[in-house]
Image (cartoon, coloured by chain):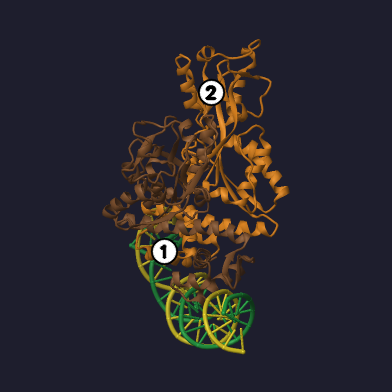
Chain colours: A orange, B brown, C yellow, D green
Amino acid sequence: MKFPWLKALVAVVDSGSFSQAALELEVSQSSVSEAIVALEGSLGAKLLERGRFGARPTALGIQVLLHARVSLRALEGIEQEVTLAKGVLRGKVRIAAFRSVAGKIITPIMAALQAEHPGIEIDLLERPCNLMPLTQMLHAAEADMAFLSEAQFDGVLGWKLFTDPHMALYPSKWAKTLEEVSPARLCSKTVITSSDGDSQRLLQRYFEQHGQKPPQIVTVREDLTMIQMVAQGLGVCIMPRFAVDFVPPEVKMLPLSQPLERHISIAVRQGALRLPAVKVFLNMLRQQIPHSDLPHFEVGMD
Amino acid sequence: MKFPWLKALVAVVDSGSFSQAALELEVSQSSVSEAIVALEGSLGAKLLERGRFGARPTALGIQVLLHARVSLRALEGIEQEVTLAKGVLRGKVRIAAFRSVAGKIITPIMAALQAEHPGIEIDLLERPCNLMPLTQMLHAAEADMAFLSEAQFDGVLGWKLFTDPHMALYPSKWAKTLEEVSPARLCSKTVITSSDGDSQRLLQRYFEQHGQKPPQIVTVREDLTMIQMVAQGLGVCIMPRFAVDFVPPEVKMLPLSQPLERHISIAVRQGALRLPAVKVFLNMLRQQIPHSDLPHFEVGMD
DNA sequence: GTGATCTATCGGGTTTTCCGATAGATGTTT
DNA sequence: AAACATCTATCGGAAAACCCGATAGATCAC
């Protein structure tokens, strides 16, 4: 088993083709091809399905890839550990997050990190959080950390950061005196919510729980579009407060009388908790968010 | 970074010397030396302290080792995955356990495993459970699983298997009619317990909790010796029922009126949960122990 | 001092790795 | 149908890595 073989495998799967992988790895295409052939030969099994389209992993390839990623990531951990011992910390941190978190939490941390540890590079893997549970990216070792919108860590380490209440965005003209919005009142309106995330599912449950027949729910992708729809009087938008960053005067943000909350949490791939860069990131995060459950991590030798 | 370098590093640290490592790896001593020199050179840091004694890791070396173990173990995972896909499962499983568990739980599983998956090899790392928390061996990737005597998983995955009540071993002649033993009664006797495990600490707390001044506590290493001491009338022995496998007629086993229990659990290094062999082991364990919290693990592609 | 037991280094044979060039395979466009 | 675009596979050769045996150097025990 040779290290470059695994790097090639991962690069090919990530980029979708041998030639693309070669570019990313900055080696020749023949090298990549030979590496894969050697790897498959040494294992005695086919890992990639090739074709005109490029290459994709076989069922076995997917399983192997998982271990390969772990192995390679651990090697990066070695380098991080060494550079840390020399005084500067350098290394990559891969974070899976959905948009609102990506923008509001991670950006300031990136800035702070830039100042304090310029060697740390953040790979932000932005994914809609309904597509596939972000925790799965941890299991597959595709990411080191994942922000979740629920405090459900299936089998991975995680901590709750804060609770984020959903708010109602009402057209101002409908809500001159209104101070809060009851489920019953919402039912009579068209409800607009994000198609990202699992707001839609949450809302369904919300109305069921409060004994209301769900109103018409429209899902929209862009936050700005949703708000503009509200401004036009097309309906009421329900979205997490944290995801709202601007409301025009035609729109009024109101709390729900029956709260609907999500719990923003962070989950960590256990192996990643050994990486100095990850520990530093988590410490920054903890500093950024008061009252979270996050403990402090000792970075360096223990 | 080359894998043989890491293999050499791990072997050297595990065996304590370059030459010993060479024997274990079945390569020449010069190879090992060259590998370590190359590794240190490529990292630009010293990882091993050499001397007449052999070699031991520097502070940095210990950190690096941790990642190295993870990386290599993941490689084994690749091979396991491939052989599994070919129909037979082969691979090593490293288990940290204390003696009573080692004997009574693991042995039958080994037998069953032998029959069903003869390719699986079990590395039993038997440690007294008071010396260092076995969970630490998981963090260091020295073991894949660890049996614990408490359901305290600090940061690692784990499940409770069963609760194990402590029993009193009384000289039969003192206990003709006695059916159970109260803390008060114990106080008047010399109490004998194991020096392995944390029975001693448990007992201290036990007496404090039940408002008794602790009696004289003698700790002994060998279970048989303890029982023989009881048979001789030298005192009363308190030990977990699970650790008792034979009592002579001169000794009577009695329950405690105020229960003192330990919770036998199993903890898994998260990365290890990806290894097919580990999943198979856990499934066997689950089968062996009814009513545990252990879930079933799907082995194979998912 | 002698010997035992370590690690480090050197020279050389074998294998691996990597590259550029090129062949083969397979759809797409003209 | 021919030419093209875009993949992966293979070949020959240069450079590098790997591994070994032999041997040098260091350090402690006696």
Q: Is residue B133 left or right of residue A90?
A: left
Q: Is any part of residue A76 visible from this angle? A: yes
Badge 1 crowding class, 10 Å Cα cut-off, few under 14, some 14 to 19, many 20 or more, is many
Residue tagged 1: A39
Q: Is residue D26 above or below residue B265?
A: below
Which residue is more in the foreground, B11 or A126?
Answer: B11
Which residue is more in the foreground, B53 or A166?
Answer: B53
In the image, residue B145 lies at what x, y percent?
Answer: 44, 49
> Tag 2's secondary structure?
strand
Residue at x 67%, y 33% (from the top left corner): A290
Q: Is any part of residue A215 visible from this angle? A: no
Residue tagged 2: A192
Q: CA distance from mark 2 to mark 1?
A: 51 Å
To which chain does the residue with label 1 belong?
A: A
In the image, residue B152 lies at what x, y percent?
Answer: 50, 40
Which residue is more in the foreground, B123 or A156?
Answer: B123
Which residue is more in the foreground, A4 or B7?
Answer: B7
> Tag 1's secondary structure?
helix
Which numbered disc, 2 or 1, marks the residue closer to the eye?
1
| Sequence-earlier tag: 2 or 1 | 1
In the image, residue A302 lies at what x, y percent?
Answer: 62, 52
Q: Is residue A190 above or below residue B167?
A: above
Q: The disc labelled 2 sits on which kind of residue? A: Ile
Q: The disc labelled 1 sits on which kind of residue? A: Leu
The N terminus of chain A is located in which quarter?
A: bottom left
In the image, residue B199 lies at what x, y percent?
Answer: 48, 42
Q: Are marks 2 and 1 in contact (CB under 8 Å)?
A: no
Query: On the same chain: label 2 and label 1?
Result: yes
